């Protein structure tokens, strides 16, 4: 998904002292992520964790921007209080690592950046939320031509991330790579296999998410049902994304209505096909990105679109994580702390008891 183009000066650039202090605190305060101890002796299988994850949200355009603050206001702790208050159980935290990693061996990740990611993950875990971190917008790897040359750097990044977060609870999930679409199938399988092995060295039972090519759209899975190699690993699950139909849900939409019987049937069709594939492969599914832009409204079917997708996915045993980016797909305005209650209610969240 292409991020929106709104650019503002990040708050931490204007008040860098606060950001650096927060980063230092992650390394020194025992309650932060690096010091989390007491991981459960029996870790939940993906099927159990997916039930717990239920309805989630993405912290989009934030740690996945070129620098935090470039596309949306920096993450603040109040967001996670709101996530809990609104009823979300999961927060997917997209992270771009390449901008903060050395270009040459040993490919060290900037410790200040690692600390910032730890802090944000800690806000989620401290509130009992499931947190997902990934490699997002690291497009430098997604190249059939340069994949082999760049894979060692990518593996070294995940080695550092996996080691840093190894002591976190089972509520932390790793997602290897967001929306691959330029690498080959063989390269996808190589990446998944080799990165999973790195993760397992320090995280033997953490849930790890694989995604298919075609930007993780389930249509790619239907067209290539056996292409993505799923290992004999009980803790691997699969993530899918959809903004279909893109001429309705995407930026610069040209279609201005959704909600016919055929529209709804198409959603149930791909969800049912995904469920059947997952059952055959014995894997659990996260519907990890979906949404429509503010170009649509209740009058053009926006709320019905959300409701149908969430109900269908949850009804098939998937967990969901709606895309929110403070931009095209914004659900909460981070400047005013105002939520789109219509979207929340369409997802089965937000205000209750008939409140407007």
Image (cartoon, rainbow, N blue to C red):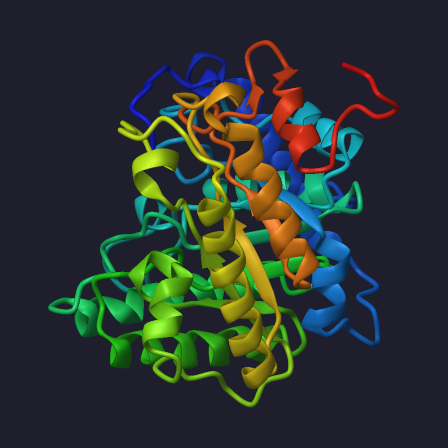
Where 107 sits versus 9, above or below?
below
Q: Residue furthest top?
A: 336
Residue 118 visible from this viewpoint:
no
Residue 217 visible from this viewpoint:
yes
Residue 296 image point, x, y percent: 43, 23
Q: Residue furthest right?
A: 353
Residue 78 in which image quadrant: top right
In front: 311, or 294?
Answer: 311
Which quadrant does the C terminus fall into? top right
Residue drawn at x 45%, y 24% as measured from the top left = 300
Side of 244 where 311 appears, left or right: right
Residue 214 image point, x, y percent: 30, 61
Residue 43 in which image quadrant: bottom right
Side of 220 where 341 appears, left or right: right
In front: 297, or 46?
Answer: 297
Where 278 sits versus 28, above or below?
below
Side of 179 where 37 appears, left or right: right
Residue 278 image point, x, y percent: 56, 76
In front: 298, or 144?
Answer: 298
Side of 245 where 315 appears, left or right: right
Residue drawn at x 57%, y 78% as measured from the top left = 200
Q: Residue furthest bottom?
A: 232
Which quadrant does the N terminus fall into? top left
Residue drawn at x 56%, y 18% as measured from the top left = 334
Residue drawn at x 33%, y 41% as measured from the top left = 246
Residue 205 image point, x, y percent: 67, 76
In front: 231, or 18?
Answer: 231
Where 31 sits versus 8, above or below?
below
Residue 86 in which image quadrant: top right
């Amino acid at each position: 998904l292409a991020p929106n183009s709104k650019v503002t000066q990040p708050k931490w650039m204007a008040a860098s002292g606060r950001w650096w202090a927060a980063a230092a605190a992650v390394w020194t305060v025992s309650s932060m992520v690096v010091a989390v101890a007491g991981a459960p002796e029996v870790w939940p299988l993906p099927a159990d964790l997916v039930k717990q994850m239920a309805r989630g949200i993405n912290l989009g355009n934030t740690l996945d921007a070129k620098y935090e603050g470039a596309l949306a206001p920096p993450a603040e702790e109040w967001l996670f209080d709101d996530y809990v208050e609104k009823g979300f159980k999961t927060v997917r935290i997209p992270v771009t690592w390449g901008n903060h990693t050395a270009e040459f061996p040993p490919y060290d990740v900037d410790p200040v950046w690692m600390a910032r990611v730890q802090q944000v993950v800690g806000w989620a875990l401290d509130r009992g939320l499931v947190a997902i971190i990934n490699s997002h917008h690291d497009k430098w790897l997604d190249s059939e031509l340069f994949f082999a040359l760049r894979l060692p750097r990518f593996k070294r990044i995940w080695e550092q991330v996996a080691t840093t977060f190894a002591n976190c609870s089972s509520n932390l999930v790793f997602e290897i790579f967001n929306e691959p679409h330029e690498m080959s199938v063989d390269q996808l399988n190589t990446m998944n296999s080799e990165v999973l092995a790195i993760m397992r060295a320090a995280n033997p039972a953490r849930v790890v998410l694989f995604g298919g090519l075609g930007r993780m759209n389930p249509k790619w899975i239907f067209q290539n049902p056996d292409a993505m190699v799923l290992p004999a690993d009980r803790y691997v699950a699969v993530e899918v994304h959809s903004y279909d139909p893109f001429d309705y849900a995407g930026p610069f939409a040209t279609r201005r209505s959704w909600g016919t019987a055929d529209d709804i049937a198409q959603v149930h069709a791909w969800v049912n096909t995904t469920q059947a594939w997952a059952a055959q492969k014995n894997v659990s599914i996260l519907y990890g990105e979906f949404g429509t832009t503010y170009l649509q409204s209740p009058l053009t079917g926006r709320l019905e679109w959300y409701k149908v997708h969430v109900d269908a996915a949850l009804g098939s045993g998937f967990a969901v994580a709606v895309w929110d980016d403070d931009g095209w797909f914004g659900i909460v305005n981070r400047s005013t702390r105002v939520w789109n209650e219509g979207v929340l209610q369409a997802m089965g969240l937000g205000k209750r008891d008939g409140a407007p």
